[in-house]
Amino acid sequence: AAGVIQSPRHLIKEKRETATLKCYPIPRHDTVYWYQQGPGQDPQFLISFYEKMQSDKGSIPDRFSAQQFSDYHSELNMSSLELGDSALYFCASSLGADPFYEQYFGPGTRLTVT
Amino acid sequence: QKEVEQNSGPLSVPEGAIASLNCTYSDRGSQSFFWYRQYSGKSPELIMSIYSNGDKEDGRFTAQLNKASQYVSLLIRDSQPSDSATYLCAVVLTGGGNKLTFGTGTQLKVEL
């Protein structure tokens, strides 16, 4: 079965640079979520989109922005990168925005800021 | 106090035994509960969802939910070394849209 696709899988950036992470949801899934997981921590919700509109926002820094496109893929743009942004970034998708829909996670992007 | 709490472990069980993982949550109005398995450096993999009080079984896994006690658990029967991973409890909190709030995870080690 098709899964969530994320690219790139690994990314190394320097401080103050910009990064763009991409997420392609499971076919027919219209809801996308972004989570950040620091070393030894649980995943923290950043932002979500339903039908190309932002549906919820969590602890996402103002330096980050995201959007969902007409084909339902999503991009997370991160500017002025800081060392503390080094983490695993997961995208998840679900069939709808109802809380009863299960979220399926992609393989993640490992971002290292040096 | 975290909204979703789990014992961090490690929880060690011998191969073939039953592993019992527990999770408590603070929001009495929560309706959706999920268990994920995460291997080190990998993404969370959905094991099971549960929404109603009682038990839900899927293969070797059984999820149990008790909303009155604000408690959800995961039982793994016939534990295998490949079950060694971190198990994350995730809850959709009331008024939290549909984002997942995770516990810190319980590390399970299945020993030969």
Image (tube, coloured by chain):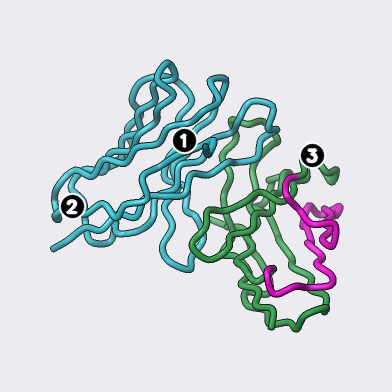
Q: Where's residue A108, x and y in %?
A: 60, 65
Over which residues does the magenta segment extend? A58-84
- Labels 2, 1: front one: 2
Q: Secondary structure at mark 2?
A: strand
Q: Which chain is cyan?
A: B
Q: Along the line of sight, which residue is nearer the eye, B103 or B65? A: B103
Q: CA distance from mark 2 to mark 1?
A: 24 Å
Q: Residue at 23% of width from left, 61% of height from top?
A: B81
Identify the residue position indicated by label 1 in the image: B49
Q: Residue furthest top?
A: B68
The amino acid pointed to by label 1 is: Ser
Residue B13: in magenta span: no
Name chain A's colour.
green
Q: Along the line of sight, which residue is nearer the eye, A50 or A46? A: A46
Q: CA distance from mark 3 to mark 2?
A: 41 Å
Residue density around tag 1, few if under 14, some if 14–19, many if 20 or more, within 10 Å:
many
The amino acid pointed to by label 3 is: Ser
Q: Residue furthest front?
A: B1
Identify the residue position indicated by label 2 in the image: B13
Q: Residue at 73% of width from left, 45% of height from top?
A: A58
Q: Residue at 72% of width from left, 44% of height from top?
A: A31
